[in-house]
Image (cartoon, coloured by chain):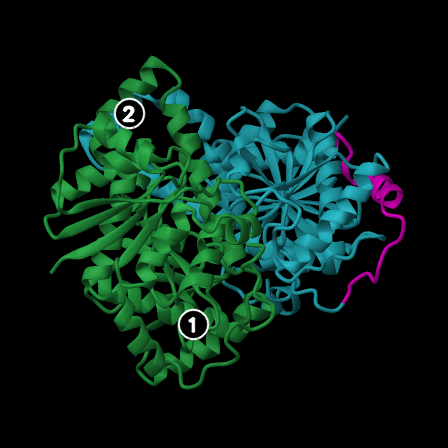
Chain colours: A cyan, B green
Amino acid sequence: MTIKISIDCMGGDHGPAVTIPAALAFLKREPDAELILVGQEELVRAELKKHHAGDNPRLTVRHASDVVAMDDPIEVALRRKKDSSMRVAIELVKDGSADVCVSAGNTGALMAISRYVLKTMADVDRPAICSILPNQKGGPTYMLDLGANVDCEPHHLHQFAIMGAVLFEAMEHRRPSIGLLNVGTEEIKGNEVVKATAPLLRADHERGVLNFHGNVEGNDIFKGTVDVVVCDGFVGNVTLKAIEGLSRFVKSVFLETTMSKIGALFARKSLKKLNPESYNGAGLLGLKGLVFKSHGGANAYAYEWALRRAFDAAKYNVQAQLSTLIAEMLPQAPNPEAPGSTIQQG
Amino acid sequence: MTIKISIDCMGGDHGPAVTIPAALAFLKREPDAELILVGQEELVRAELKKHHAGDNPRLTVRHASDVVAMDDPIEVALRRKKDSSMRVAIELVKDGSADVCVSAGNTGALMAISRYVLKTMADVDRPAICSILPNQKGGPTYMLDLGANVDCEPHHLHQFAIMGAVLFEAMEHRRPSIGLLNVGTEEIKGNEVVKATAPLLRADHERGVLNFHGNVEGNDIFKGTVDVVVCDGFVGNVTLKAIEGLSRFVKSVFLETTMSKIGALFARKSLKKLNPESYNGAGLLGLKGLVFKSHGGANAYAYEWALRRAFDAAKYNVQAQLSTLIAEMLPQAPNPEAPGSTIQQG
């Protein structure tokens, strides 16, 4: 089965210099992939030429005149750049020309444009961003929301849990355990929102819909205590960025002296386990179409991982599974597009 | 000037096996320190004997019959263990026998007993826990609150900022910059509480009371963008534990193979920069008395660092500075011990 991916080639800190070589490498690796490169045609073609890319029936270029800058306010990206590579790439998903879209652009703009173009799924109040992190057990830990929703109600966290579970099962081919991120494992712990969320997840567990483990703490993310960690977008965003900051700190320490560089060389095989690059690619869930987000600072190797995840999500039909399962799992859907959604600011 | 420290010898995962050797090492290092070892006398004396500790006029043992277990509910620790080593150590601060208390026990119990015994300072609504983390600039990043208050209002975060600033200035001898932890640096970003906090800090900045940098993101904690990072106890606790989890993951990766162990050996000098052990020791701020918290799992080396920090805080008179400066900095103090404080559950 062919999977078509639309790529926002201009997105991210490095634009075509990263997205194009990544796309070419992925195309080589994955014979079932078809790629639509969206961006300023001249720049895209120049980069393709640089990499000696010949004509390929599985590779097309789609011109888009605008570029959403990494620091563009959401309003500007949404209202004033209607022919941005980001928007066009998403529109290709909307009109069925692509199965999934990948962008390394501004997260807020990507979520806002995705919501505007694709719309939110029936039964879902708010889309969420689900990242994948490595854990000590050697498996992935899925974590959501990572920044789309900074003020959440219990029923939002409940929906995140369901969407995360569906994504995990589709991508990893087994039923995940779900943990609610909290300051302690005891049920009495937590802030008001989290305390009110646990009973919703517990009820799902009892009716056999979710495998709810209970509360988990920050260190459980890396322990691999559960497969899917659920939190609001404020906590998720801050935690993810703190983790990234620490990773960069560790990396800088290894580059400090000759001795430490030698040390890193010796340990490099083990260190690969930690490689955040291979965990690039976060899913925007709850939209009427699949969108994946790459880290803005990703290099070509990391970006290729985002393409792989997007490909897998489309291949395993995450979108259809989300539609079916969310409708089944959620007995009733409270106010879609409820007020208090802070996607415009998050 | 002699500084008297009361030590909850039974607290932490390892009790006297860690606290006693740490106390003895610290006593040797710091001629101006006097230590009161609080705990089950027989166990404490046995451990002292094991380390061949002779009589020392700067070392006394104070018997306490109960022990607060790491998993004791706060109610049990507070109401049923009135002669616990934790409580007696705090009472020694209350009655002036000690300048500061150090415990590696259960954080919730320590905060609850400290509040009960010492009481909250006038002008402070809620005490907070302030940790110290390493950053890429080679300096410390102070971060609070780290778990005492899971549901916060803007005026709580405002007070945390002031308390963190006072602690930093007393311990580091320079005026700190303050950052408000958020999902982005722009003022329009964040959840409702954070958005309402920024103007309070901005106003303080304008009247010259605080050096408010603005919003910071999770990665700024390790970048060293600001000296003091302010957040609510939910976000702080989750972030800190995620950081600890990642650190443990990295450590485990280095212990995996012979090659990675050799790598760690080569890099060990640089890796010391990251050593979380030397950043052990978090201050409980906003109480009518100084209490420091060691990590529960601390080894003797790390515990000694908590003793050092407690010693410095007492030596530089943090408590008196907090009283004076908070009164000066806060024009008015809203409802002390306000409802909504979740310290009993946090």
Q: Nearer the viewer, mark 1 or mark 2?
A: 1
Task: Please provide percent x and percent y for residue B35.
Answer: 22, 48
Name the residue rendered at 81%, 61% in the picture: A336
Q: Nearer the viewer, residue B301 or A210?
A: B301
Q: Which residues are magenta?
A: A315-338
Name the residue rendered at 62%, 47% in the picture: A38
Is residue B250 found inside the magenta-colored segment of the image? no
Q: Quadrant of residue A98?
A: top right
Measured in 3D between alpha carbons, the distance from the residue under mark 1 to the one under mark 2, in whole angstroms, is: 42 Å
> Which residue is identified by label 2?
B264
Q: Secondary structure at mark 2?
A: helix
**Residue type (three-letter) at the residue carrying disc 1:** Gln
* Dot 2 alpha-carbon crowd within 10 angstroms: few under 14, some 14 to 19, many 20 or more: many
Task: Please provide percent x and percent y for residue B211.
Answer: 32, 73
Q: Nearer the viewer, residue B107 or B239?
A: B107
Residue extending farthest to the top is B258
| Mark 1 in CB contact with mark 2 (< 8 angstroms) | no
Classify B296 as above or below A262: below
Q: Chain of mark 2?
A: B
> Which residue is identified by label 1?
B159
Task: Please provide percent x and percent y for residue A250.
Answer: 34, 38
Task: Please provide percent x and percent y for residue B136.
Answer: 29, 48
Q: Quadrant of residue B123?
A: bottom left
Can residue A251 be spotted in the picture? Answer: yes
Quarter of the image that includes the C terminus of chain B: bottom right
**Residue type (three-letter) at the residue carrying disc 2:** Ala
Q: Nearer the viewer, residue A60 or B304?
A: B304
Classify B41 as above or below A334: above
Tell me the number on the disc at residue B301.
Answer: none
Q: Earlier in the sequence, mark 1 or mark 2?
A: 1
Is residue A331 found inside the magenta-colored segment of the image? yes
